[in-house]
Amino acid sequence: MRKLLTVVLSFLTTFLFAQEKPVAFKFLEKTDSAGKHQLVIRATIAKGAKLLSTKDIQGFDGVKTSISFDSSSIKKMYGGLILLTKPTEEKSVLLGEQTIEYFMDSAIWLQAINVAKGDSFRIKGEITAYVLSGEDLNSFSYPISKEFVFKEKAIAVSTDSKTVTGWLLAGILAGLIAFLTPCVYALVPITVSLFLKRSESPAQGKTNALFYSFSITAIYALVGILSVLFVPQTVWNNISTSWQFNLFVFVLFVVFAISFLGAFEINLPSSWANKVDSKSNFKSYSGIFFMALTLVVVSFSCTGNFVAYLLGVASKTNKYAAIAGMSGFGFGLALPFAVFAFFPSLVKEISKPGAWQKRLKVSLGILELAFALKFLSNVDIQLGTFLLTRNIYLLILIGLFAFLTLYLLGIFNRKGGSILPAKNADKKFVPIPRFIFALIFLGITIYLVPGLWGAPLNPISGLLPPYGTEEYAINGVKGQSKYKIKPVKYVNELKKNESAAATSAGLETFFDYDEAMAAAKEQGKPLMIDFTGIVCPNCREFENRVWTKPDVMDRMKNKFVVASLFEDFNQELPDSEKRFSSLLGSQLNTVGDKFKELSIKLTGGISQPNYVFLYHDGTKIIDKGYGYDDVQKKGTDDFVKHLDLALEKFHKQ
């Protein structure tokens, strides 16, 4: 009787199932981190349909989904078929109240495949699927066919020349700024004097100075190479985004600023200069190299903040960017020494305590206070206190740049340890270069003012506190949530860090991967992951430049479910979720660590911002992520095309 019932059911389901199949199968090749190959079988199930599992149903022989392979394919396999999707269990009225297991939305199986060097073959087989749809039971067959070709494992490293060149130039600029700090600047006269006076000839002195500059550049380049080769890729990222490091840099900048403003002088101990003198040996290049190394070591108290921050940010881009940044920093720091050796008369000029030098030092002091403010803001954001709101931040910046403008125009003068109004300001002429700089800072001051009332200030938005801390901004579009599954996890902690573009447009953003994926399945939309950072200037620039475009925001708001995953979010994970990550090479302790691991799984590295689009089974719609460099090279219209490509591929499944 049971066999007869099975035959009748099979006949009826085959006869009735002449319409569109409610389940689509896709076959993919996956290579894990160890280089092992796997066949991925992914089922995408129509809404309301239930795909029966491969488990037998008592009394109904053969009424189950089965996956089989031909004999030649089986020889290439090892291990059994692994089910990744947890099935739902219930009693079926149609099947005599028997307990059945089924899948809704999607299901994934994995099969390990042995692909040896030189192999090229095709895995073949067949899936017989049974699908419950309302009161109907349908079945159909689907052929399995997937080619496997052995490929040498390659490490994907971004070597975009624009990115590397950009970090090289940024490093040079940072090196030139670091040269002006007391630890380095004070060494110029004594160092150049040693080269010129103790060499056998002027030509030899210049040669030695060039080698000295080359050695400084080489030492910093070597630091960059060693750091990216031997330090785990998360370490510099953790340093540059930690509140402790940012607080240290803030204090360092404030101390230097106060010194430049004239409150006190930072002088190098005379013993350091004596040490350089005693170890110098102009008959040996090794002696000159030692002098360069000594400079690097003794100036670290002034340059360490530049080095750590440069390594931390550049390493998140790629290894070559970090090395280029450090090489550029060394070059920028060393270049003035070579210039002064070739033009020794300049040394006398910079050694004179003239009025221009005082104005330069005061100007640098004010600028260092402005830089310090950014690091204090990072501390405030990381600790989640949000005391330094966007408005307060802008007010301080406006005050600093307005004062600098007046100072350059001669309205104020420095006398001793004080800066006072100049009594004869109206009787003095302002040099043209100083007047031009005053106009530049006046323009910056005026530009910042509208930001107090909510102007986005897009060009510098990445340097400002999050838009969520704005006190006078006009509220964004608000309405009833369109999701049954609403953002809950980490909302209280991260809502203030949400993009200004998202807030103003009423885009509902998730901050947790699992919640976002559940909402994507519920809405039947692709998941758009935004790998971002709390302290990430490039992320804020991308959001304010690209998300604000109507074509972009319309697609994000209506056609995707968006998850912003903050990789530097330092909230501690529950003990049950803490574990060692082989991808990170360290322990997963924070929510940000978890998102970094996910970023490496999906993109092969850590970079911010980076946009990845996923099917409901967690696999990528488009293999390559889309980042800051992509929009820099191709423009905002290209991101619209990228979104459309993701939508097209998603709806084809």
Image (cartoon, rainbow, N blue to C red):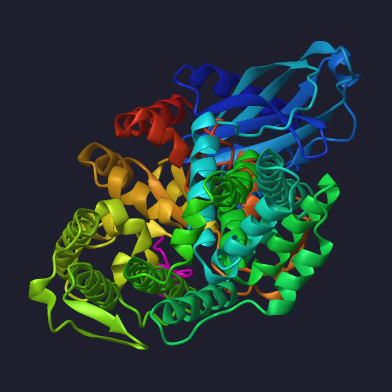
Residue 272 appears anywhere in the view: yes
What is the x, y in percent for residue 202? 66, 43
Q: Main secondary structure of the magenta part?
A: loop
616 lies above or below 120: below
Q: Does residue 488 show up magenta in the picture?
A: yes
| Residue furthest to the left | 426
Classify residue 598 as left or right of residue 576: left
Classify residue 17 as left or right of residue 453: right
Residue 535 appears anywhere in the view: no
What is the x, y in percent for residue 470? 25, 72
What is the x, y in percent for residue 99? 68, 50
In which quadrant of the rendered view does residue 550 lie?
A: top left
Q: Residue at x 48, y 58 (%)?
A: 177
What is the x, y in percent for residue 194? 69, 58
Rendered-image quadrant of the N terminus: top right
Q: Residue at x 24, y 54 (%)?
A: 433
Q: Which residue is drawn at 67% across and 32% down?
A: 156
63 lies above or below 509: above
Q: What is the tally of numbered marks visible in this picture?
A: 0
Classify residue 373 as left or right of residue 87: left
Q: Nearer the viewer, residue 102 or 379?
A: 379
Q: Residue at x 16, y 76 (%)?
A: 411
Q: Nearer the viewer, residue 496 or 192?
A: 192
Q: Which of 464 and 263 is in front in this view?
A: 263
Q: Give the range drawn in magenta.
A: 482-495
Q: Does residue 549 show up magenta in the picture?
A: no
Q: Nearer the viewer, residue 273 or 317?
A: 273
Classify residue 614 as left or right of residue 128: left
